[in-house]
Amino acid sequence: MKVKINVNQQIKVFECEAGDFLLETLRENNYLSVRRGCDTTSCGVCTVLLDGKPVPSCSLLTVKADGHEITTVEGIQAEAEKLGKHFGDEGADQCGYCNPSLALTVYAMKSELVNPTIDDIKEYLVGNLCRCTGYIAQERAILSYLGDKS
Amino acid sequence: MVASEYLRPKDFEEAYNLMIESKKNYLVAGGAWLKLSVKSAEKLISLDGLDLDKIQVNTDYIEIGSMVTLRTVEINNDIKNLYGGILSNAIHKIMGINIRNLATLGGSVMGKFAFSDIFPALLVLNTKLVFYKQGEICLEDFLANPKMAKDILTKIIIKKEPGEGFFKKVAITPLDFSVLNIAVSKNKEGFKISVGSTPYIAKLATNAMSYINNLSKITETEILKCSEMVVEELKFSKNNRGSKEYRVEIAKVYVKRGLKKVIANES
Amino acid sequence: MKVVNTKVHSVDGLGIMKGRPAYTDDLAEKNSLIIKVMRSPHPYARIISIDDSEAKELIGVEMVLTYKDFPRVPFTRAGQGYPEPSPYDKFVLDEYVRHVGDEVLAVVAIDAKTCERALALIKVEYEVLEPILDLENAIDNKVIIHPEEEIHEKFPIGFEPKRNIAASYHMHIGDVEKTLKECDYVINETFYTQAQAHVMLEPHTVNARMDYQERLVIYSSTQTPYHMRRIISQALSIPISKIRFIKPRVGGGFGGKQQIHGEMFVAYVTYTTGKPAKMVYTRKEVFESTFSRHPMKMDVTLGADKSGKLRAIDFHVLSDTGAYGEHALTVFMVVGSKVLPLYNKVDSVKFHGDVVYTNHTPAGAFRGYGAVQGNFGLESAIDMLCEKMGVDPIKFRQVNMIKEMETSPIFSIMGEGTEGTAMDMETCKLEECVSRGMELIDWKNKYPRVDLGDKVKSVGMAIAMQGSGIPFIDMGSATIKLNDNGFYNLLIGATDIGQGSDTVLAQIAAEVLMTTVDKVIVYSSDTDITPFDCGAYASSTTYISGNAVLRAATKMKEAIVDEAARILESKPEEINYDGIIFSSKSGKSITLVDLSNEITYNHMQKQLSVTSSYVGHKSPPPFMAGFVEIDIDKETGEVDIVDYVSVVDCGTTINPLLAEGQVNGAIVQGLGMALYEDVKYTKTGKLISNSLINYKIPTRVDIKKLTTEFVDSYEKSGPFGAKSVGEIGIDTPPAALANAVYNALGIRIKKLPITPEKILLALKEKENK
């Protein structure tokens, strides 16, 4: 079947089968920043934005995204660069596998939460696992990013 | 997942007929649980076009369409204000934001997961389910009936009324299924107490409720006795996440804390 | 120092955050054949027959590989220096399957769906055998897990497969029995540590293609590209010169990628068919069919006298290496060699035991590598001894722990698989780590506990050491070349798996060359282009590879000064260089940029390029003191980690932010192991914890505060004074937590993980007595 999805502000037509999930469809179409971390919708690594909201692309049927907007990190490069600079300042980069999906979720969080406390932020991001950093440097970087009005 | 077709029925009758046509035809709500449980399907039936994704608030009821995402329910103001936010709190504890943006309240209810955090909260509220063919069914009956005929859940209706609520999820990490979940509510008619993931699906502790609702005076002693009655009447067992002993101990503790909390909040 | 010990941004973080293709599967050929492995449903079985005829008929199926397709050449999958201290007990495919998830056969097809359809058509008949599922029943069990004739050890490691022993070891100094008789206080306790899964977020992935020189080019998510190349060459009889092994960006390893995973199949398929092929592990395969931490049973006996002196240690260990023996001996030895020297002043010490085969998922390398298991046993036992003696556990440690310029006879006796290397602790700031840590956590006001009503607050601590590479075995090297326009390429074999070695090594080079990190372009881990490096393990990269980079950069600086001297008609010793301009006494000068352009294009052209290597002569340990503050709910046993204080002596921190990240990341993994991570099996040997639904790792909500500091320390033998920092962080949390729980509630948990259930039920039992 064919689906029409607005990916990063570009209308794309993808070939897919009824039971395909968006993660595979995106990767086959060279959106390589969207990656797989697990089999059970448990890690957050495959997160993309569906109409601006974070969803697990491994569990979203490609056909369900028909007619909707999908954002991958390729679509928020300026924000990702900003967040990346804060990550660099705080030494929060390690293996980076969780980073693009985290950037998307943080970006969505920025628009959704008003004056969040540190606990609000942690709870919003709880579904984005990280095994390398121990989270503390990421937290510092995200707080700086949220406060960065440039 | 291997599936032959994805269909977008225009009305409930079409969707219903496709559903009952074959055991390998599945309704697709969010799709999150479907991905985990179904390896191969024949027809996938979309519920997207059936106008099930709205929350309607009347004077007496909040009507939640079955396709409303968990996140949308969680942040809805009327839900947040209901019984101290008990349902919002319960939903907030489910996995991460990305799953809650995909999973629907209807999908979560129909899944009838024993570990589900929404059932204790919904049980201590006044909750009815509305099905396409079978009409209104109260939540307790739905949960107690394993042999319900296949049907399409269209709405979850919760009575709007003043009250206090307490919800606790006990889990190894925030992203884990509950070892135990506990909900307590109090309104002008009295207390409701529900414990779930025991590891069995949530139930109301009706004997314990009856005891505490017939007391003229409630002190520490009565609260303790009530919590003990809860663990006597409900069924507890062990699974990979905890032993029966442990669950019984913490159930008593959190029922006790829940009762105290709703009493304190009321005054 | 201008670059080293400064907060330089990583060289690769920005591009990764922006989503650039970088990881192994991002670089797979689009038309790769897909390989899927059929895995054993039984913990122990013999394959009677395989009927793959229907599968082979399917359109799109390229081949089905069974044990009959491979020569019977045993090897070890462990990524270690050759000859490996692990038994050669694995065949590419075998007639026997030895754990649930073991490889039965492989299907190769044009896409994943065809592979799945083919797998469903293959019928395998098994003779189900009785498995061994308890490490305490393994030795001399009538069931023999490895009866094969061809398997062997490369040198004596105590390999007795007929007794289900993969390795064993015994050492003693002095006479422990005799000393114990003289002790006023003796304790004897048994501890258990569980298997832990790495859960690196990127599952194991590998792909291959033939290039136009008819060479096999493999991209793999690995920690040891050179070892992988060698093992594949040996096992598949492919000339090593025909293999190019590249490690792209890796999404975490922690030891879990220090072994062969899918490379064997992918290499075989591409080499024999000429077509590109790939294998991406599912998370289930990562749990069931790669490796986890060696679970262990430790019997610890300690003896002390009235004066407060620790006199004797007896450490008996039983380690479960699972179905295959990768890293069996070496992890086992580290339980002793990187733990026992902490108390170096004992009169006698004995370390002994066995590593046994069972039909569990194989155990392998995992950060800490035995030191975390040993630390749990020893540091818990020390607190228990102090309790019996009625002495303060910190004062006891301060008297008995190793100090700067001291040594331990264990260093020369115990290496990693072989003899060790004697060394004095030229840097050991344990005293400062302990006192600073006490300050940071406010130990005096919180020890042993503070009652908070429903909850009780307490603190607990442990000290730890690790190592920096394996002396006389691990070798690293670096090539530096000067480009036109005055920038350098730094080519290193060293394997960045997310710990930031690309950045750290660039910093070392930049410091020597008096330039900035952006002028040192790093390319790493490509067996054709980068010089040899053992790989990312044993906390070796900063110390070993760093020293190699230091040497190469020093030689390069000499070379460019020589060129400048020639151009400026002066002598090298009379050239002044500030990193940008060379100037001679006579007032002539030339910039590096101009010099590099001149020697590339204009006059006396040459390519300046130097390569240096380094092998360690010792393994200077990093040290740390770890303190945990917890609030325990007395009625439910739930534990809140309020703060974890780590004070670390790792020598110079080449990059202080990345070093802090290493410690914090390791602490959180250690906390996971301490609190709830648990590889669990059913009674019939199937993994229950084979998905992230059933295996939980710490989330960001679980981690409230981590306080990490580094003490001033300068290890002369390390590059710019650095030791290592990759593993030390993981060692203390289990013991620190066990000690804190004891301080809070008077209950001692000796079997990890320390869950709320264990705490509550132990508390109830104590109250009932």
Image (spheres, rainbow, N blue to C red):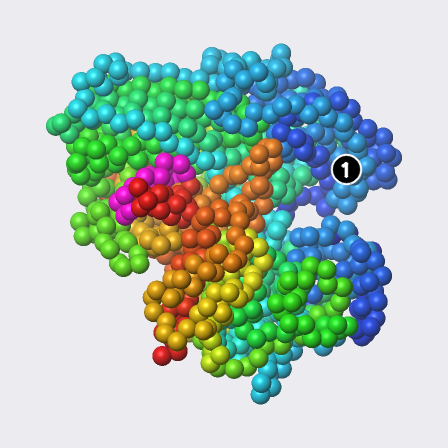
Query: What is the chief secondary structure element of the magenta stretch?
Result: helix
Q: Locate residue C133: give its quadrant.
A: top right
Quadrant location, the N terminus of chain C: top left
Residue C635 sits in which quadrant? bottom left
Q: Nearer the viewer, residue C335 or B113?
A: B113
Screen quadrant of the C terminus of chain C: top left
Q: Residue B64 placed where, x, y %? A: 63, 76
Q: Give the image location of residue C207, x and y in percent.
A: 66, 38
Is C720 situated left or right of C237 in this image? left
Crowding near the residue tagged with mark 1, few <14, some 14–19, many ≥20 C-alpha atoms within 10 Å: many
List x then y, in percent, for residue C555: 38, 32
Q: Is residue C266 magenta?
A: no
Q: Quadrant of residue C311?
A: top left
Q: Residue at x 64, y 62 (%)?
A: B144
Q: Position of residue C504 (x, y in %)?
A: 40, 43
Name which residue lies at 64% across and 34% down.
C101
* C502 or C607: nearer the viewer: C502
Residue B26 or C202: which is nearer the viewer?
B26
Was residue C734 drawn as part of the magenta stretch in this picture?
yes
Q: Which residues are magenta?
A: C728-752
Q: Is residue C136 above or below residue C655?
A: above
Mark 1 highlights which residue?
A: C119
Give amino acid for label 1.
Leu
The residue lying at 80 percent from left, 63 percent from top is B19
Q: Residue at x 71, y 70 (%)?
A: B153
Horizontal side of A13 relative to B74 (left or right) equals right
